[in-house]
Image (spheres, rainbow, N blue to C red):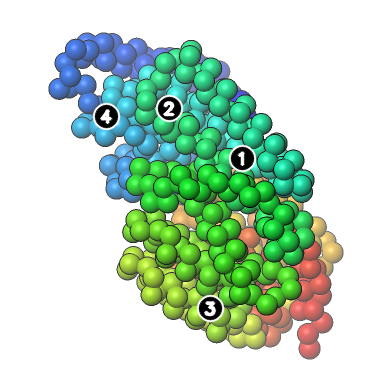
Amino acid sequence: MELQKGFNFNLFLNTNENFYMKLHFLSLLVILTLFNCKKDGNNAEDNYAYFGGEIMNPNSDFVVILKSDVVVDTIKLDKRNRFLYKINNLKAGLYTFYHGGEVQMVLLEPKDSLLFRLNTLEFDESLVFTGIGDKKNNYLMNEFLENEIQEKKIFKFCQLKPHVYESRVDSLKAFKLNKLNTFKSKYNPSALFEKIAKANIDYNYFSSKEVYPFVHHGNNKAEIVKALPKDFYSYRKSINYNDDFFKEHNHYNSFLRYSANNLALQDHLHHSSDSEFKRNSLCYNLDRLKIVDSLIINKTIKNELLYHFTANYLSKSNNTENNDAIVNSYLSKSSDETGKNEIKRFAASLNNLKEGGNFPDIKIVNYKNEELEINSLIKTPTVICFWSNQYYNHFKESHYKLNELKEKYPEVKFIVINIDDFGQDRPKASLKDNRFKFKDEYQFKNPKESIEALAIQPMTKTIVIDKHQKIVYNNTNIFSVNFEEQLLGAINRK
């Protein structure tokens, strides 16, 4: 996608303020460039980088910079929502910056002076870099966004026969390599940039191969796998499944997840007697945890994958016995004590939300700042949904859908809860800007405790309760094809 897609700076600043903002950034760039020139030739002092920017519609008043999951520093935004930070003793490589639940990676090398602008309402799409180091980071950012668009194409291509599909993804890879070579010829970037950019292309390509059997139509996965060319996965021989350098890299981690899915599928098909593959079956998910345990040696990578697959399974399961089996398998394989405690609490919360059980007492606050017990609102069949400014598209689409449902089912109470923990101003502004009414809109009184108690994962989670305050569905989705059927069942309960 293009730079600044969806970003209109004049929506947020008047003309004069916009002029001074640009002047401010230009001044910073001039100062930083002169400072860099002055330091040229003094190698002992060259090992630093400047990183800063401006955040429109901030979700908090700070930015966190991390390297290899270790916090470098937490930087407060000034009154204009800007910051500038110097990283001394720089370790060249990928850094993560975190703001309000959103994360993005940047490549920093010695003497970079990198500035960015972003609008949190379209976090990735609005992010644009300027300054020394901007070319390589804008290239990587554009690649990231283009890959998101291409994922939709890949899913369509997956319906093609294997050899035709392979030809299409090979062409996509060749196009990207050609684009990278053009960039290299024009800007002569570092070997580190080239390593990362090439890995982006490779791991994205490998992922497209791994996902094919799952997306290709039909549930007879054994036949689909059998129809693949013999060399379809030949690249696996050269893969480092324990790459410490790329362990926090999006494309690498996506590939590892897809690969674990696929390798577990092949193992599962050898001993499963099911006529159709069921992705949420206990057997397959236990197989997947075994694959991760046997394939991955690096503790960080292994623990992250084990946690991801376990939490993902639990978030979609209503079977307590199966949940216990998955949790026990995870606990026996992970060495991450923090992750273990989180999974145990997550499973316990899910068990407390059993269908047919009572909905827990949760305190909520309306936008008049009045505190209420959520159960005091449940006198008719009730749907409880959640949203966050961090998932802005979901916020808008879910509210449009809820407005439709409210018209069709006036006898149902719809309770919509913002789960964010940064006050009421931002959620109120989001509702107002999109012309959504405040009626039936709430926030948690204690967000952290309530999110854990209701096991809110994923964000699309929806809970349906009958007029007796009994849970009918503890984990459904208003966008599901059978949601209205489920809702009618709750309405007709005596």
Foreground: disc 1 or disc 4? 1
Amino acid found under the numbered disc labelled 4? Lys
Pointers 1 and 3 in contact (CB under 8 A)? no
The label on residue 194 is 2
Query: Which secondary structure lies at badge 3?
Result: helix
Amino acid found under the numbered disc labelled 1? Glu
Q: Residue 486 falls in which quadrant of the image?
A: bottom right
Residue 400 x/y as whole percent: 74, 52
Query: Which secondary structure lies at badge 2?
Result: helix
Q: Residue at x 28, y 42 (%)?
A: 73
Q: Nearer the viewer, residue 97 or 241?
A: 241
The image shows residue 164, relative to residue 34, as above or below, that is: below
Point out the tag, 4 or 3, that comes first from the N-terminus: 4
Query: Which secondary structure lies at badge 1?
Result: helix
Amino acid found under the numbered disc labelled 2? Glu
Q: Quadrant of the N terminus?
A: top right
Q: Residue 487 falls in which quadrant of the image?
A: bottom right
In-image side of 483 versus 254 (left or right): right
The residue wearing badge 1 is 148
The image shows residue 311, relative to residue 11, as above or below, that is: below
The label on residue 86 is 4
In-image side of 95 versus 126 (left or right): left
Point out the tag, 1 or 2, that comes first from the N-terminus: 1
